[in-house]
Amino acid sequence: MSWFGDFAEIEKENEPLAPRTWFKLGGPARYFVQPRSVLELQQVVARLRENNIPMYVLGGGANLLVKDSGVDGAVVCLDQPEFKKMQVRGETQVCAGAGYDMQRLVKDVIRVGLGGLECLAGIPGTVGGEVKMNAGGAFGDIGSRVLEVEVMDQNGQIYLRKREDLVFEYRRSNINARFILGAVFELTPEAPERLNERLREIWMYKKNTQPLAPHSAGCIFRNSNGVSAGKLIDQAGLKGLREGGAEVSERHANFITAAAGTTSADVLSLITQVRDRVRDKFDIILEPEVVIW
């Protein structure tokens, strides 16, 4: 019998995680939970704590590598309708749930003539995950547009983090709560035509500089003190380096792509090789940006 008891209908056991990640790699979750409401999420979290079961939060799976052995714990996914709502508030503010797809949000706000999120074009993920890690790139980051964030801690307590309390830095924020439930963005009115033109320019840039088609998790390493990780990897001569089906992209050295038959162990080995080679050549230790479970 499942430890979930009366929550059995929202819980699965030994659920494959690979289809839910952009790498399409890794083993199953011992438990996989999809709460349908905030109250149900609170009850689930309480049950997990009572049973001392490790808890992981899954968003869009874009910045994630799951090990071949899978996850010995409960993976909680906020992908139900309650967490995928969006609303325009006033003339310039947009509220979006944690599970709302970011690429859909970018298009939705452009459609109503609000700019500021188009810099996130081509960065897969959900609102919760992208706010927590301050997703962005050469054209800007999401943190600059966040007005407030609703969060829930591991005790089930819900509170609001206001702009003045939030700190967004390169690929990180000071949001330490276990769950982000939603966020409010302050955007700028602008003609949809101009916004769409900017969106196309950003897409063309990414299409020409990044491997958008093969399975990957985006940038593998964080930049180091303003120095491009991709540039360091390139200068170390590592483009095209392979381990099994995993390869350092020829198009962008900070991307690792996974061909058919690749294992997570292949990717992990390649990550280690790249870190070691960059350290040996430049005396710089690259910090992973991709999350490893």
Image: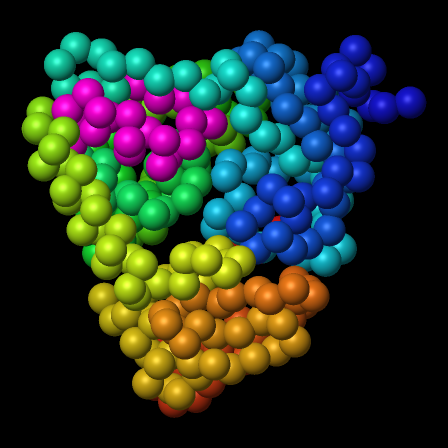
The residue nearer to you, when weighing 199 against 162, is 199
In the image, residue 53 sits, relative to residue 7, either above or below, namely: below
State which quarter of the image contains the N terminus: top right
Q: Is residue 204 above or below residue 21?
A: below
State the image quarter where residue 67 is shown: bottom right
Query: Picture coordinates of residue 183 (x, y %)?
Result: 33, 24
Count the marks.
Answer: 0
Residue at x 75%, y 38% (from the top left corner): 15
Within the image, what quadrant is residue 111 found in? top left
Decide if residue 160 is in sight here.
Answer: no
Q: Considering only vertical position in the picture, is 174 above or below 44? A: below
148 to the left or right of 23: left
Q: Residue at x 36, y 70 (%)?
A: 252
Q: How has the structure been colored for display? A: rainbow
Q: Within the magenta stretch, is there residue 260?
A: no
Q: Position of residue 259 (x, y in %)?
A: 60, 66
x 74%, y 24%: residue:
11
Q: 65 or 168, which is in the foreground?
A: 65
Q: Residue at x 22, y 51 (%)?
A: 202
Asked whether 52 or 41 is in front, the reply is 41
Please identify the quarter of the rendering in which residue 141 is found: top left
The answer to whether residue 172 is left or right of residue 88 is: right
Q: Which residues are magenta?
A: 95-115
Residue 220 located left or right of residue 209: right
Q: From what the image shows, is residue 63 above or below residue 12?
A: below
Residue 273 percent coordinates (x, y): 54, 80
Q: Answer yes or no: is residue 243 visible.
A: yes
Q: Is residue 109 magenta?
A: yes
Q: Is residue 33 left or right of residue 191?
A: right
Coordinates of residue 55 in the picture (x, y in percent): 64, 35
